[in-house]
Amino acid sequence: MNKRIEIPAPRRHPVGGGYPRGEEARAHIIRVAIEAFGVHGFEGASTRTIAEMAGVSAPVLQYYFGGKQRLYLACADFIATTIGSRLGSNIAGARQTLASEKSSRKDLVLQLHDLLSAILDMLLESDMTEAWTLFVMREQAHPTAAFETIFERMQGPVIRLCAAFVAKLSDLSENDPQVTITALSLYGQITSFRSGRESVLRVLGTRKLSRAYLAEIKSALFRQLTCLSRASRPRFKR
């Protein structure tokens, strides 16, 4: 069930004639560049090809970004900003629940479940393309300066929030390795439904993760978090 990603055919000018301007033009080029970098990698995607795909001239691309490296970093910034915006209210709610002395263990479980469910929805139901996933996965495999942006503004804050919830639910310090590993496990199992989607689909024997499957994933996550909240400490020792 390997899915081939198609790169849009080059077009010389945007629909309607002329070039888009300002921030609109910049965002358009970035979206196209994410597709190119995601599929072909930094070395394989030339600025000339990206310019043709975006329907602009090479000098226009140079004007906005000053070169391929800065365009690549702008793509990482765009991904981190977009995802941060989509998860903003969930992250704010999670931080508020953690800060409140009135939050019960049930509140903590529900809020953490809400955050992880929002991530799952974003990964599986949003308009994020395969190329976005490939872009991030390439940085995971071979980190560059772009990875600092992706991690510090997108992945890091979410994982640290998960760790803060796990610490409270398990009565351990946030600095305890067991807490960090548990948080990474929770985050990893959610993101794996996107990064390992083909394996998931084959094991389930389906061509698409329907809303019914999505609901079952969330139910399984809730059961896991509930078990965590009932145990005052992890059941294993280092």
Image: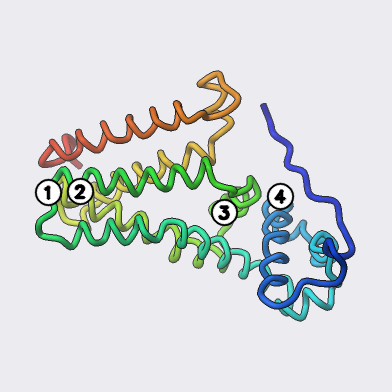
Q: What amino acid type should be assigned to the residue bearing mark 4?
A: Val
Residue 211 image point, x, y percent: 47, 30
Q: Residue furthest right?
A: 12
**Circle 4 is placed at which residue position?**
39
* Disc nearest the viewer among 4 and 1: 1
Residues at marks 4 and 1, CA–CA distance in whole angstroms: 45 Å
The span from disc 1 to disc 3 (Cα, nearest Å) is 36 Å
Residue at the far front in the pictured view: 16
Check disc 1 and report its element: helix, strand or loop.
loop
Mark on residue 104? 1
Q: Is residue 50 left or right of residue 88?
A: right
Q: State how far apart marks 3 and 4 are (Cα).
A: 11 Å
Say which residue appears at 20% left-offset and 58% top-offset.
Answer: 98
Residue at (32, 46) in percent of width and height: 114
Residue bearing the label numbered 2: 108
Pick whichever of labels 1 and 3 is earlier in the sequence. 1
First in residue order: circle 4 vs circle 2: 4
Reply above or below: 26 against 119: below
Amino acid at circle 2: Leu
Q: Quadrant of the N terminus?
A: top right
